[in-house]
Image (cartoon, grey):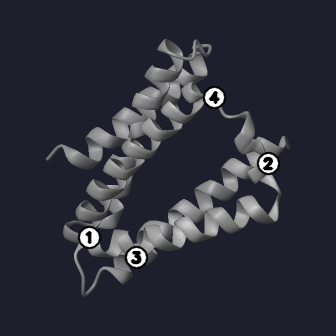
Amino acid sequence: MPTWIFYALLSMVFAGFTAVIAKLGLKNVSGDAGLAVRTAFVFVLVWVNALAFGHVRDFNQLTYKDVFFLALSGITTTLSWIFYYRAIKQGDVSAVAVIDKASIVITLVLSFWILKEPFTWRIALATILIVSGLLVLTVK
């Protein structure tokens, strides 16, 4: 198994736990307050990871363009997390998670258009299945 698939599977498992654990932590606070606490832990742990594995030396290789795109990604991540936490505070995590994960369709379109990644019949079929599942869940 390629390393990237292993990492993606680990990401999937931890992401699956994240929403349910977060919902438990939002019992007595707003989504925004809960997100602030969570993000503080994320900030510290990401820095510990970068320091522990010696990746801070990579910072001198960053260009202004790299920093711009990473900052833009940080802004979109922040907005995504703010609305995600507000959604799981008010709604069922099972429904919110499916809708949120449908962002893969946006990711796919952007990866083909901007990154020029290949479009295959397998990706097309997977996209159709994802959108179908989203419609089954959200249309009454």
Residue depth check, mark 1 versus mark 4: number of the one nearer the observer: 4
Alpha carbon of mark 2 to alpha carbon of mark 3: how far?
Answer: 28 Å
- Whether the residues at callouts 2 and 3 have beta carbons within 8 Å, the answer is no
Residue depth check, mark 2 versus mark 3: number of the one nearer the observer: 2
The mark tally for this picture is 4
Q: Is 107 on the left-hand or right-hand side of 88?
A: right
Question: In the rendering, which numbered label is found on residue 37?
Answer: 3
Residue type at tag 3: Val
The residue singled out by tag 2 in the image is: 57
- Whether the residues at callouts 1 and 3 have beta carbons within 8 Å, the answer is no
**Residue at 35 percent of width and 35 percent of height:** 132
Q: Position of residue 128 (x, y in %)?
A: 42, 27
The residue singled out by tag 1 in the image is: 31
Residue depth check, mark 1 versus mark 2: number of the one nearer the observer: 2
The residue singled out by tag 4 in the image is: 63
Classify 22 as above or below 106.
below
Q: Secondary structure at mark 2?
A: helix
Question: In the rendering, which numbered label is found on residue 138?
Answer: none
Q: Secondary structure at mark 1?
A: helix
Q: Position of residue 81 (x, y in %)?
A: 36, 56
Q: Earlier in the sequence, mark 4 or mark 2?
A: 2
Report crowding for label 4: few under 14, some 14 to 19, many 20 or more residues within 10 A (C-alpha).
Answer: few
Residue type at tag 1: Gly
Q: Earlier in the sequence, mark 1 or mark 2?
A: 1
